Image (cartoon, grey):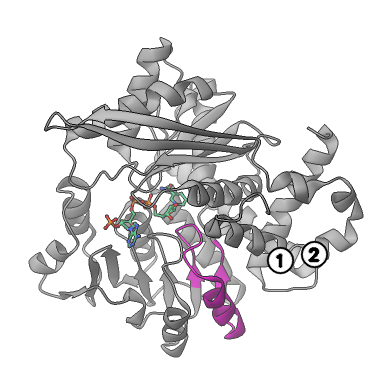
Amino acid sequence: LQRSPNEPEFQQAVHEVLGTISPALEQHPEYVDGGILERIVEPERQIMFRVPWIDDAGKIQVNRGYRIQFSSVLGPYKGGLRFHPSVNLSIIKFLGFEQIFKNALTGQGIGGAKGGSDFDPHGRSDGEIMRFCQSFMSELYRHLGEHTDVPAGDIGVGAREIGYLFGSYRKITNRHESGMFTGKGTGWGGAEVRTEATGYGAVFFAQEMLAVHNETFAGKRVGISGSGNVAIYAIQKATQLGATAVTASDSSGYVVDDAGIDLDLLRQIKEVERARIVEYAKRRPSARFVEGGSVWDVPVDIAVPSATQNEVSLADAEALVANGVRAVSEGANMPCVPDAVAAFQNAGVLFAPGKAANAGGVATSALEMSQNASRQRWTFGDSENKLREIMRDIHTAAFDAAEKYGVPGDYVAGANIAGFQRVAAAMLAQGVI
Ligand code: NDP
C-alpha cells in the first residue's frame, strides 16, 4: 500500500478486506507464507490512456481512460466501465479490487478488473457520446477479448454506450466476438435479465438475510438511492415482492413517494428523457422533491443504497437506525462509509456488503458469456431463477464463512473470507506469478 499513498478509496477498500480476514489467515498460514497479501493488492496490469474526441462545437476535448486488470487467477478479467467526472486511479483501483472477491463469490470463473474515464456524459449529445466511445475503444480494444478481458457497464455506461463500444470493437478487430462485452442488447448477443440483475440481486440477497429471521419484504417500506440501472430494478423487484419502494434520487436531490415509486414514470424520465429526478415529483401528485439533503432521513424498513461510493455517512446510518431500519443491502459499490457499516452492525441491523449483495450483475454477465460461447439463449424465467440461485449460494457462502470463523451474522467478514479463500487457493496453486 506504500506504493499507493494518494489513493484513499483504494486504501479504504483494502483495509475493509484485510481488516476482516485475519481469522482465515490464522488458520491458513500458507496464505501469509505464499505472499498472497502482498501480491493481491498490486494489480496485474494498469492501463491509462489519452481519449481525444471532438465535441459538437468542433472543439477538441481530452479525457483520460483507465483499465485496471487486477487479477485473472480465476478467469478472464471481468468488471464494468464507469464514465463519470469523479473517476480517477484510486476509484478504479478500489472498484477493481472489490471486483476480484465479488467475482470469486459468484463461483463463475471470472477474474477482477474495472475501467472507465473521467468523461461526463451528462448533457452530451448522442453524437458526442458515440465519438467519445469510439475514441475510447480505439485504444482499449487491444487489451480486450473474450478470453482476456470482458468489460460491462457501470455508472454512466448503459445500453447506449455499450452499443457504441461494442460496435467500435467489432469494426476495429473485424470480429463479431459476442463474449468480449456483456450487457449487450438482447437482439445482438445480450442475455435476458442482465439489465435487471444487479438491482434484483441486491433485493434477493436482502430477502435471504430476512428469511434467516423468518421475515419477508411484504408490507415493508424500502428506501433506494440513485435512479439508474441498479436503483430502477431494485425498486421493481422490491415492489413485486409486496414492499413499497418510497424513494429515488440523483445528484440533485431525492423524491419521496409514499404511494410507492411509479416505475413506468421513473423509467420514462431517467431512461428515455434522461432528465433530472425533480421531473418525477412534478408529474406525480403523491411525490415531493427534496433538493440536496439526505435520502436516508426518510423512515424505511429496508435500505438499498444504489448510487455511488461513500454516499451513506455515519449521520445517515444513525438516522436510519433511529428510524428502525431492519436491513441494508448495498446495491452500489462501497456506498456506506466504514463508520456507517459499524453503526449498522452494532445496532443489530442486517447488513449486506456490496461485494456480495450486488454480485448478481456480474454473475449474470458470466451467464451471458456462457450463452455467447455455446450460442444459446435462455428465457427470462430461466435466467431469473438462475440469478436467484446464485444469490442464495453467495448468501450461504458468506453466512457459513462468518459462522465458521467465529463472527456469526457478520456478512462483511463472511463475504470477504469466502471470496478471499477462493482467490488465495488458486494463487497458491498457480505459483508466484
Ligand atoms: P447509473 O449511471 O445507471 O446510475 C447511477 C445513479 O446514481 C444515478 O441516478 C446518478 O445520478 C447517481 N449518482 C452517481 N454518482 C453520484 C454522486 N456522486 N452523487 C449522487 N448521486 C450519484 O449507474 P448504475 O446504476 O449502473 O450504478 C450504481 C452503483 O451500482 C455504482 O456504485 C456501481 O458501481 C454499482 N454497480 C453497478 C452494477 C451494474 O450492473 N450496473 C453492478 C454492480 C455494482 P446522476 O445522474 O445525477 O449522476
User: Residue at coordinates 77% horizontally, 51% vertically from top-left?
Assistant: 37
375 vs 265: above or below: above
Give, as a single range, the part of the protein colored magenta.
Answer: 328-353
Give the left or right position of residue 42, taking residue 274 as reference: right
Quarter of the image with the N terminus is bottom right
Label 2, secondary structure: give it.
helix
Which amino acid lies under the numbered mark 2 shown in the image of this protein? Ser
The image quadrant that residue 189 belongs to is top left
User: Residue at coordinates 34% horizontally, 21% vertically from top-left?
Assistant: 168
Residue occupied by mark 2: 22
Which amino acid lies under the numbered mark 1 shown in the image of this protein? Gly
- Image quarter for ligand 1 equals bottom left
Residue occupied by mark 1: 19
User: Residue at coordinates 48% horizontally, 59% vertically from top-left?
Assistant: 202
Question: Residue 428 location, x and y as percent?
Answer: 84, 40
**Mark on residue 175?**
none
Question: Residue 336 location, x and y as percent?
Answer: 49, 69
Q: What separation in Å lies between label 1 and label 2 (alpha carbons)?
A: 7 Å
373 vs 42: above or below: above
Check whether the beta carbons of the residues at disc 1 and disc 2 lie within 8 A of each other.
yes
The residue nearer to you, when weighing 167 against 286, is 167
Question: Label 1: few (<14), some or many (≥20) within 10 Å?
Answer: few
Q: Magenta span has 318?
A: no
